[in-house]
Amino acid sequence: MRLKHCHCVYDFRRLAKKRLPSPIFHYIDGAADDEKTYRQNTRAFDNCDLVPNVLRGVDDVDLSTTVVGQKLDMPLFLSPTALQRLFHYDGELAVGRAAEQFGTLFGLSSLGTVSIEEISKRVKTPKLFQLYVHKDKGLTRNMIDRCKAAHFDVMALTVDTPVGGNRERDLVTGFTTPPKPTLKSLISFALHPAWAFNYFFRQTFELPQLQAYLKEGTSIPISVADYFNTMLDQSMNWHDAEALAKYWGKPFIIKGVMSVEDARKAVDIGAAGIMVSNHGGRQLDGSRSPFDQLAEIVDAVGDDIDVICDGGIRRGTHVLKALSLGAKACSGGRLYLYALAAAGQAGVEKALSCLHAELVRDMKLMGCKNIQELGRNNLRFR
């Protein structure tokens, strides 16, 4: 299977599985406990049907939108995800450049493998930084200050990781960052020589947002769950979030909101947006999907704050359903990580091209010339 044979997210997943060692693939693909929430994130869209209109003159379709002050050419952006140079040697640079080609927002993680400064220099598209608040307050402040100096546009505080989820696939494969050589992992690396060559002989794997403060994750292997459990600040509260928003001073998003109560608190502290997200099903298994929670959150705060549906997106129709419920935009991680692993920047660009084409085609089939014409009148729930 080659890139030319990939036409949807599921095709990119199959190609990524062929090209990645088992521990690396299952880190992307896996989730918490029984992975029920992970599966429900996408299945939730199946309980909702689109009702199209016809004869609406849809020769030109405008997909543009504005989210937390950022003008985007399409209502889908690339959520921040960790450790991208484990999946392809260009990592976040490949993803950022692809986002730039489509005029959409690119997210960089605190656990990213390309520095804030390099992304700022080489990626010219709206940029979001995902902040994990560490016990080391100097580290947290340093990341914010670096983002200010690098002119990042948006800060997203991730709030659903006070501890790491029980990602059992990682326990089975022994996944750590950086990868820890064991007999099992070395066999897997040997069976994927192209990946092994790129990992061991190209630029040294680093976590440049963290390495001046922490050795764990860069030179000392650690599981993601253990990293969250030992390095992140479990005492974080809404007062702390408000202080961070004020210190940042630009558009501020709370990522990981799943309840109306928390959505209202995000409004109260002055956040510009919320990402309705359960961390891709990687934290609390058995929790609701973002799409299932979207309507009640939009009804409660949609006039006061930008609501983003994050997670489970696999098709253009999923985006249209979320927009019809009142989301300002959608975002996702796996939808581009599989493509990154499959073929680097070219893979991410093709994945975005496929999704963009779906959005344009599906908008025309819906009888809508712009996303403002989408609404709940064109949805029916089973």
Image: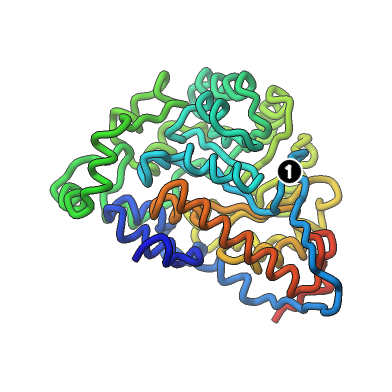
Residue drawn at (49%, 60%) of the image:
285
Looking at the picture, how far across and down is residue 346, in whole percent? 46, 50
Q: Up-down: is 154 above or below 243?
A: below
Please state, as top left, top right, bottom left or bottom right, where the C terminus lies in the image: bottom right
Residue drawn at (38%, 65%) of the image:
14
Looking at the picture, how far across and down is residue 191, in whole percent? 19, 54
The quarter of the picture where residue 312 lies is bottom right
Sort mark 1 into few (<14), some (14-19) or many (20+) by Cα contacts within 10 Å: many
Q: Residue furthest front?
A: 59
Number of labels in the image equals 1
Q: Residue furthest bottom?
A: 382
The quarter of the picture where residue 206 lies is top left
Residue drawn at (50%, 33%) of the image:
110
Residue 199 visible in the shown view: yes
Scheme of colours in the image = rainbow
Q: Up-down: is 229 above or below 35?
A: above
Residue at label 1?
A: 273
Residue drawn at (69%, 31%) of the image:
239
- The reply, left or right, for residue 264 in relation to residue 197 is right
382 or 127: which is nearer to us? 127
Looking at the picture, how far across and down is residue 349, in whole percent? 52, 51
Looking at the picture, how far across and down is residue 316, in whole percent? 63, 65
Residue 83 visible in the shown view: no
Asked which secondary structure carries label 1, the reply is strand
Hey, what amino acid is under mark 1?
A: Gly
